[in-house]
Amino acid sequence: MTSSQSLTSLMESSRLPTIPAVAMEIIGLVQRPDIDIEVLSATIARDPALAARVLKTANSGFYGRPRSVSRLRDAVIVLGLRSVKTLALGFSLVGNMRKQGARGGVDHTRVWQRSLLTAAAARAVATRAGYACSDEAFLGGLLHLIGVIALDQALGEEYRELGESAGDDLARLRATERSRYGFDHAEAGAALAEKWNLPEALITAIRMFPKPDAADRDFREIVRCVATGEAAADLILTDDTGAALSRFRWDCEQLFGIEAEGADELIAKFMADAAVLGTMLDVPASALSPEDVLANAQEALLQMSLESERENAQLQADRERLTIEASTDALTGLANRRHMEEYLAEQFRISSRYGTPLSLILFDIDRFKGVNDEYGHPAGDQVLREVAAVLQRTMRDADLCARYGGEEFVAILPATSIEGAEESAERVRVAVERQAMLAGGAKLSVTISAGVGSYRTGEQPSHDWLLKEADMALYEAKRSGRNRVRRFEVVEAASPWSVAG
């Protein structure tokens, strides 16, 4: 069965909330631009409970200063036709659904608390933004969760599991509904609104409040007001008040041009309005004052900010650590071969472009295999670490020192001639020779050999040539007796390649 077929089947259920006859008449009157006060008053009067609520609203100050109105006709005049149509329709529908009660596991009181808060906040935001749709936004907020009521009424106990698992997280509830039924409560509510022949603006608000920016342009203002009202309701009904305050402020500023201070002022307004409406519909108001709600939310938001800063600092530290680990030799702490080759390629590119000097030294620990064989690999590792430390403290900060592999090390010297590099290599050789090294409880005498290569303008096609030439010079240092430095030079006579001592 497709999702549309499932939704159609739901709408055919005999257990769905029904619409009272008075509401049906009001819906017809709502669609008429030429409605008469007497006709509307007479229609409302046929439902004593509805008439009492309209009178209470007129006297409550919900639409301005409190008044003393005793006749329904006067209440209609005081409130205005447009507001009365909205209130009468909302009160009639909600009052009827409240009487029908819950069949499954959904807490209807909680649903109507959220709906009232959303309605009051949507109206407050629309009014502050100067929109003409404040009454429609109010009714859209009041009815935006009728899909939850419909699913609960029609499915009974089957819906308990979904409601309990999602709690106050409506996004999670919608995702679970779509997974199980192929549609969610927003779609179900819109289908029920269509079945009741509600105005298109209300149908759209109910269907699109989870994704207001996708709503038809003609109704986007109303839908955005309802969606922002939802964020406001989260301030009172969820534990994540910091995130709710952040979203409410963001919506107010980005969607309606209401700055944070103005958004905070709206909290007291919509909470007071929701409390007034709650007394008329027997829906309990929040036990918290607006000041407490705002204070708690601001404290939670500050905590979120601090936690976010800590997480960002930790993420940055982790990124830096991973970057270092990815470019560092774990044993010696020097740059690893991959990082060295990337750096050498970049420096070679710079020298090729600008003609600046660049030199490279390739070091090799003399007779290192004998250390491993006689004293063991842990002793060999200690020798590698100590040679790396000598190399690091002897070379300049501007030079990159790296472990090339095994017992070989590389130093890259930007802006350095071959003569300067040769002097640096000799300093390292002497420092290693003089360094007292202990490994495996034994005092070792360690020496190194070095080969030096340097960039020559236009003569070497790639950075690999520097490594090859330094390697040739290192080979000559080894062949000449070890513990010495040799440099690669091009000699014009006889062979084009030569190693200088």
Image (cartoon, rainbow, N blue to C red):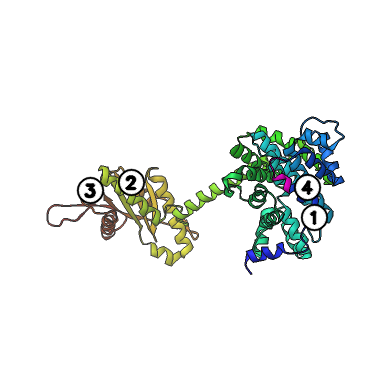
Instruction: Please give the label number shown on residue 456.
Output: 3
Quarter holding residue 259: top right
Give the farthest residue toward the left. 493
Tell me the mark number nearer the camera, choosing from 3 and 4: 4
Pointer 4 residue: 113
CB under 8 Å between discs 3 and 4:
no
Q: Nearer the viewer, mark 3 or mark 1?
A: 1
Q: Position of residue 56 (x, y in %)?
A: 84, 38
Q: What range of the chain is rendered magenta?
A: 28-34
Helix, strand or loop status at disc 1: loop
Distance (Cα) linking label 3 and label 2: 14 Å
Whichever of labels 1 and 2 marks the residue nearer the N terminus, that label is 1
Quarter location, residue 332: bottom left
Sequence order check: which comes first, mark 1 or mark 4? 1
Mark 3–mark 1 distance (CA, rounded to whole Å) = 82 Å
Decide: is 147 above or below 126.
Answer: below
Whether residue 235 is visible? no
Nearer to me, 399 or 93:
93
Q: Is residue 120 magenta?
A: no
Q: In 3D space, how far apart are the residues under numbered discs 4 and 2 (Cα atoms)?
A: 72 Å
Query: The residue tagged with tag 4: helix, strand or loop?
Result: helix
Q: Earlier in the sequence, mark 3 or mark 2?
A: 2
Q: Amino acid at mark 3?
A: Arg
Q: Which residue is mark 2?
A: 413
* Image side of residue 325 versus residue 430, left or right: right
